Image (cartoon, grey):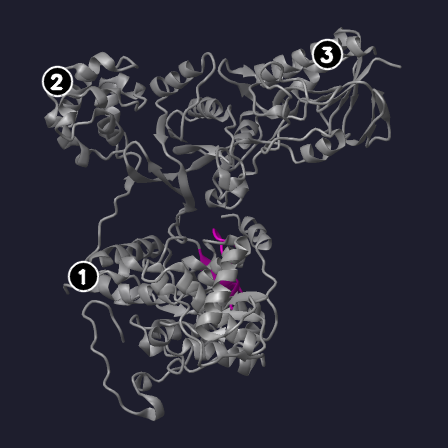
Amino acid sequence: MVNFGYGLTPSSAVKIIEGEDKLYRKLCEMEPDVKKCMACGSCAASCTAGDFTEMNLRKLILSLQRGYYQQALPMVKNCMLCGKCNIVCPRGINTRHLIMSIQKIYNL
Amino acid sequence: MIFQGKQKIWSEYQKDIPEDHYFYVRSCIRQSFFPASEKTFLDIVKGELGKDFFETPHHTTCGGIAYHAEAVPQETMMTIIARQFALMTENGYENYVCSCITSFGLYTEVMEDWREFPELEAKIRENLWKATKREFKVPKYLAHASDIIYKFRNEIAERAKFRLVNHKTGAPLKVVEHIGCHYSKMFPSKGVGGAEYPYVLAGMIESWGGEVIDYPERRHCCGFGFRQYLVKANRGYSMSNTYKKFESMEPFEPDMIITNCPGCPYFLDRWQYVIAEQTGKTYGKDGYGIPVFTYEEVAGLVLGYDPWDLGLQTHQVAVEPLLDKMGVPYKPEEKYKGVGGKVIVPPEFPMNIKCC
Amino acid sequence: MTKNVVVIGGGASGIEASRRLRDLGYSPVLVEKEDHLGGHLASWNRLFPQMIPAKDILKSLTSDMKGIEVFLNTEVISINRLKDSYVVKFSNGLSAQVKAILITTGFTLFPAQKKQEYGYGIYDRVITNADLEAWFNGNKDKRVTDPQVIGFVHCVGSRDEKAGNRQCSKVCCATAVKQAIEIKEKFPDAVVYCFYMDLRMFGRGYEDMYLKAQKDYGIRFLRGRVSEVSEDINGRLVVKADDTLLGKPVKISMDLLVLMSGMIAPESNMELSKMLKVLPGEDGFFSPANAISNPTLSNRDGVFFAGAATGPKTMPETLSEGRAAALEIDSYLKRVGD
């Protein structure tokens, strides 16, 4: 192969392919409240870990919904399970429990 | 796909293209990329159709590349264009036709700007007078050269020696049409067919017997993008855009691509080579690429011009598979001969993409 | 002189206002350009958030039209001002001299084909909110055939200066959520996306409907406008959008895309406004003299507005304005002496 000094850049678009989100569907079964998220960002705004790391629960939920989890999952290890997001969620999602379920389903 | 829906849009975006008497300006880069295309255009409109197309050696660039690469300010570019218009006026023409899509977009932009801001036009008139003592009239009609071929597509079809049809099976060839972004994306009403479903090339393809392919990334840019290509560090983006288009059109198995822009055929052609050399992937049958043409080259093929006189040997992707499908005769041994049969050294061949 | 009032537009507010005027002792003339009463209500299936069938509402509205002169297939040709009254000529050859005119011309749906990039009328599986309501009403539509992935595009031709329409159409967010729920009921295995910019769940029960759509129906909400639609080799739609909350472009293959066409002012408003000498606003809808204290009053004596003629409204708002306008006309006519 020839080296031209530049190459193809992978597309940044998320290709949502139905039927490939089996894990997310499993998560919905185990944690039905995840469907109630309206992506307001209260969780991320109050997140202790978010100030210093990539952790952002709003983005994580969206990424899982879009089947974009491989890129998003590493952020979970930054969560300290402090539960602050649990207190602020306006839709009353048990976010702490949700994060633990995510860890189980996605084998973290 | 609802064909009538497209026809409806096409009927809403028609241009009243004048029949005759044009001042013709060439493109800066086409003569080195696709050297015979502009000559073929003039041969067709003047020779075949007997129209009056005038050109002068005094014309220059429109300044488009420098302007879009932010190397010259708007006023400079406008003054360059004003000088072109002055040449048209001095030679007694009112219809202006350019070979380049970027020029077409830029001329349209400048004329619209002057219409909206007459004080800007006044200033440019003053600039031009100070610099060259020239005066100009704004063209009565601005056309892109593909508009002209579009207008005379049926006349060309009547004279056709070959059609965009597989001469063995009689099946229409599957043709991808690619429109330069600056043709109608900025001013949809200035392009035949508008911005979303342009008809200028589709009309030629229909008229010459081919079948137009509408693939998901049809509207996407060829990838040139000026600074994306001009700066080497960004060149990967340029190629990635082309790659995206080819990945999207691949399932439709197109026989050929027709374009109406200087940059697009170049990048759609040459990036196939780079993609093949980097990844091993080719998009045509049996290790070939998908041949890419300018609309003048295709018009020339339809009219029965010799492929090597059309400059098809300067393409990276081999055109022979298409010539074979159309039944166009050609002499392989003549491919790399210069003027008057002079033997010149054939080019070096790539590893991964077949080039006959 | 008869106690006539001309009501222009036989949609929900026109009907309601006519009935109330009749109850107050007047003999309203209700003019409708179509061959039936009911306007958009007549072609809708169910109304949010209670999911009440539109035909039930129309039926109760039109159950008692006694004392109301209804002209169908009729348009207003001219309106001439006399000293203290108006002479209104109709296309059916009749005319009326009245002291009050009520404008209930409502809205038209934005023609979705104008947003060419969405391919309505070009791609086989792109429909509008109105087409979907027609399908819910039992009209056959081969574009709706066992879809696996369905998308709703909010704000088609609304909040879009490029489409010549800056205003929010108010009801499409709730309509999209309603229709998403309804189509999910028809195709329980389908995945349904809503592409929204903002979700304007302003009315009572709307937020509950949104929550229900998420929780009980698994509708997925994706914040971002669709950029373009195309068709792949199998005829499936390829929809490109920006997921603004994820900060990434997304690409989804779909079997059905529903465009939520917004409300725009009818073109005929221009003609009518010239006849009446009441200027419409920049958006083409009529402007009340005081939109807060009394949205049914125009800046011209004897000319009144109700319903979506003065901008996008929900059905209950439209009906309330119809009633309010009837009362307002009554007190006006008592004041000037009918």
Compared to A27, does A11 lie above or below?
Answer: below
Q: Chain of mark 3?
A: C
Left or right of residue B313, residue C120 in this image: right
Distance from disc 3 to disc 2, alpha carbons, whole Å, reads 63 Å
Q: Residue at x 57, y 29 (%)?
A: C134
Q: CA distance from mark 1 to mark 3?
A: 76 Å
Give amino acid for label 2. Answer: Leu
Image coordinates for residue A76, horizontal then vertical, percent: 14, 27
Which residue type carries mark 1? Gln
For the residue pair A57 and C239, the one nearer the viewer reads as: A57
Task: Find the residue positioned furthest to the front.
Answer: B130
C91 to C204, vertically: above or below: below
Image location of residue C110, percent across then percent down: 56, 35
**Do dots 3 and 2 share one subunit?**
no
The stretch of residues the image draws in magenta is B194-213
- Residue B60 highlighted magenta (yes or no): no
B204 part of magenta stretch: yes
1 or 2: mark nearer the eye: 2
Residue C42 position (above or below residue B110):
above
* Left or right: where B282 falls relative to B118: left
Classify mark 3: residues with Cα within 10 Å, few (<14), some (14-19) or many (20+): many
In the picture of the structure, the residue carrying the numbered disc 3 is C19
Within 10 angstroms of label 1, few (less than 14), some, or many (20 or more) residues? some
- Left or right of A11 on screen, residue C181: right
Q: Residue B278, which numbered label? A: 1
Q: Amino acid at mark 3?
A: Arg
Marking on residue A81: 2
Write down the chain letter for disc 1: B
